[in-house]
Amino acid sequence: MRSVGIDDLEPGMILGADLLHSGRMLLPAGSVITSGNIVFFQRQGIGDVKVLSSPQAEPDEESAEMAFRYVRDYFMFVNHDHPAIMTMFDISVRRTAVQIMEGWKLPTYEEQTVSELDDMRDLFFRDEGKVEDVVDAEIKIASFPDIFFKVKKVVDDPTASAQEIAAVVGLDVGISAQLLKLVNSPLYGFPSKIDSLSRAVALVGSKELCTLALGLSTISYFKDIPPELIDMRKFWLHSLTCGVFAKIIAEKVDGVVPEVMFTAGLLHDVGRLIIFKKMPCSSIQAMLYARENFIPLVEAEDMTLGFNHEDVAKDMLKKWNFPSELTDIISNHHSPQDAEAKIKATILQVADNLTNAIEISNGGMYVLPGIEDGAWELLDIDADCLSSIVEEYDRQIEDLFQVFFT
Ligand SMILES: [Fe+2]
Ligand SMILES: [Fe+2]
């Protein structure tokens, strides 16, 4: 998405965000701008308009070359002969080239580093504590929202009706409103509006809705992390993007429930948030170390902390009594061959790499973590489909982000 001055706006461009003026909606996101719209915006005194970068835009040679050199560094750590990685590289170079052509300035190293932390202390120094200490310290101060367990109890009861399940979900007003927005979002693309939870249960499925409720409860658990510690918007955009990719890939693989993969994507890096809360100084150190040395964050965490966000998630999700399958997939998203559900953990790993690949053109800081040898082949899908998955994502993400984070 980019900002365009009203004088440079052209018919056919696509509006990237709702256009509001004095609290009034002039045009919703996703609309194709007409010459009539442009005249109207001029009369209203609109200065800039956010438009989507055209997916069909053909980057010029100079931009493509600059993008190639810039993106190459982010693929340093991964196997260049891998079919999925090669496709991700092409996607990333193209998106970055279009951004450059449209005036994006490549970020400098300083712009990509994180701010200093004052008055922050880690729970312990390296080697003086373990993963369990980090998790126990978190659990001591806050408990996991219990709406999920209430929903799970009624979903596990074979005699419960859609109305009964809906009534229990409805106990949490925030979660039920978000669930309704989610099933009405482009992620589901139902032809007519779903205006009740019981209808959502009937259409999406009770177990599936329960899994989505779990994802939403977890997001609400972390809503009060101080913004100076981590850019939560970027963090959740990364998570949501990974969730969307994981869901779309899952739809192409037999025997995988897309909602499970969406929730797994949404929560895959949740261990990072616990590390942020309890070990802020080491977290920053790991981020800087990863950035300076072009190594994946998970490796940098191992070096600075002696453990990583997979280890923390594993212990945390067990103590929170998460479903064992989700715990297994999330705890092995960088090492899917160690998972019991290898195919699902691989979907998550591919989705995470694809997320990192498209983030590069938006100033993403980290190299691709890579796909484990032999994992991709388990999915039995064509690497070319990753490009159409990204196109599908581009059409959905703005609306979806609003569902979760406004
Ligand atoms: Fe991760
Ligand atoms: Fe990630």
Image (tube, rainbow, N blue to C red):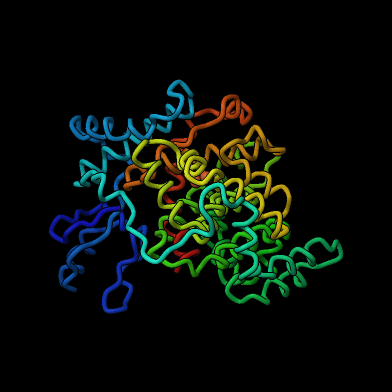
Say above or below: 90 vs 292. above
The answer to which quarter of the image holds residue 376 is: top right
Residue 221's x, y, as percent? 57, 67
- Return the residue nearer the eye: 211 or 60: 211
Residue 124's x, y, as percent? 53, 56
Residue 34 makes an appearance in the image: yes
Q: Residue at x 56, y 29 (%)?
A: 372
Residue 266 makes an appearance in the image: no
Task: Quadrant for the C terminus, please.
Answer: bottom left
Number of dots carrying numbers: 0
Residue 161's x, y, as percent? 80, 68
Q: Residue at x 70, y 39 (%)?
A: 341
Q: Residue at x 25, y 46 (%)?
A: 107
Horizontal side, residue 25 vs residue 140: left or right = left
Residue positioned most to the right: 159
Q: Residue at x 43, y 30 (%)?
A: 77
Horizontal side, residue 2 vs residue 386: left or right = left
Residue positioned most to the left: 7
Horizontal side, residue 239 vs residue 360: left or right = right
